[in-house]
Image (spheres, rainbow, N blue to C red):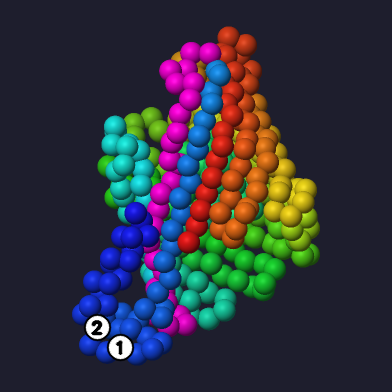
Amino acid sequence: MIKRTLQIICLLLASTAPVMTQDTIRANDFDFSKFRPAVQFFANAEYNPSAGVTKDYSFWIGRAQFGFDYQYNDKWSAKILVDRTSAAGLINSMYLKQASLQWKPNDRWTLVGGAIVSNSFYTQEKFWNYRFVAETFQDRYYCIPSTDLGFGVTYTFSPRLSIDAAVTNGEGPKIDQDNFGKVRAAGGITFTPVKGLILRAYLHDKGSGAEGSVHEKLLMLFAGYEKENRFRIGGEFNQAEGYQNDAGRSSYGVSVYGWITLRGSLKYLARYDRLWINAAEGQTTAGETDFNALITGFSVCPVKNVTFCLNYQGVFHADRGTKPGQRVLFSFEYRL
């Protein structure tokens, strides 16, 4: 359906084109040779034997997003991405996830504005490479949005070293701004000392004008190593003070993940997460406890941009009174 929609859009634009050549079609100065569609879809078939769940078996869509990139010239480019989501009972509601304009005047500077990709966990998510199986730590547990409204800048010293900074709303692309005009200021540094090894440090300061609130300060340290296409292993540490802008709350945790190629495109993947939450009495929400999480499984890529993964996911709470959650999923993803 998404592919059909893109085809219809392209045909409508092309129908107004005053000039048609073999290599380029123009419609109101829209150059299709600079147009690149972007489509990503993933879904899961799940078996959940955990006690107290309402559905033992279920099928659900994790993501369905489509859009395009457009390269105006060697310095200017734009991207639009629409995402299907589930919110307030609307199973197939859509929202504008990304709508950004990028200016790259030279090989060192990159500036971007609009609904932009967050610099908080993009590096970790790209390295983990199994977003369709599970989100990375900040996304999964701290609910930090993957895109946000604001501006970002990256300065590249060399192919091995770069720094980046961003000022965003901190609420995600669905909300224009909070009632107090507070923002999230973030910065990071990425270093690749040798081939295959990547190091990154990231900080953010998120304000809130709510009565009694404090600034949330988050620190993230990440290291990852990849040996060609044979194996990949990485780990990250996160620490949040003033967690969720509450003065009496803090949180920290680690996530270690990786995969190894067994044969051809067949890979074995594993991940371990540990989350701690410190809060004054009465400040924790229902079900919010320290826990360990485990993900393990096998994935295969029969053709380029199509991946299947049979995986197990378990959550084991430090509070023995909270029952563990366990499930087995068949996850798949395709991209265009």
- In the rendered structure, the answer to whether residue 14 lies left or right of residue 295 reads left
Kind of residue indicated by mark 1: Met
Using the image, determine if residue 62 lies above or below residue 23.
above
Task: Look at the numbered disc 2 and give the secondary structure of its residue.
Answer: loop
Dominant SS of magenta comes to strand
In front: 256, or 12?
Answer: 12
Residue 234 seen by the camera: no
Mark number displayed over residue 17:
2
Using the image, determine if residue 59 lies above or below residue 287.
below
Q: Where residue 315 sits in the image (x, y, percent)? A: 60, 25
Task: Look at the numbered disc 1 and give the secondary structure of its residue.
Answer: strand
- In the rendered structure, the answer to whether residue 53 lies left or right of residue 159 reads left
Asked if marks 2 and 1 touch (Cβ < 8 Å), the reply is: yes
Classed neighbour count for the residue bearing mark 1: other residues with Cα under 10 Å, few (<14), some (14–19), many (≥20): few
> Does the magenta portion include 296?
no
Q: Where residue 232 sits in the image (x, y, percent)? A: 74, 51
Q: What are the residue bounds of the magenta stretch?
A: 51-77
Kind of residue indicated by mark 2: Ala
Residue 25 seen by the camera: yes
Using the image, determine if residue 327 lies above or below residue 109.
above
Q: CA distance from mark 2 to mark 1?
A: 7 Å
Q: Which residue is mark 1?
A: 20
> Does the magenta portion include 67?
yes
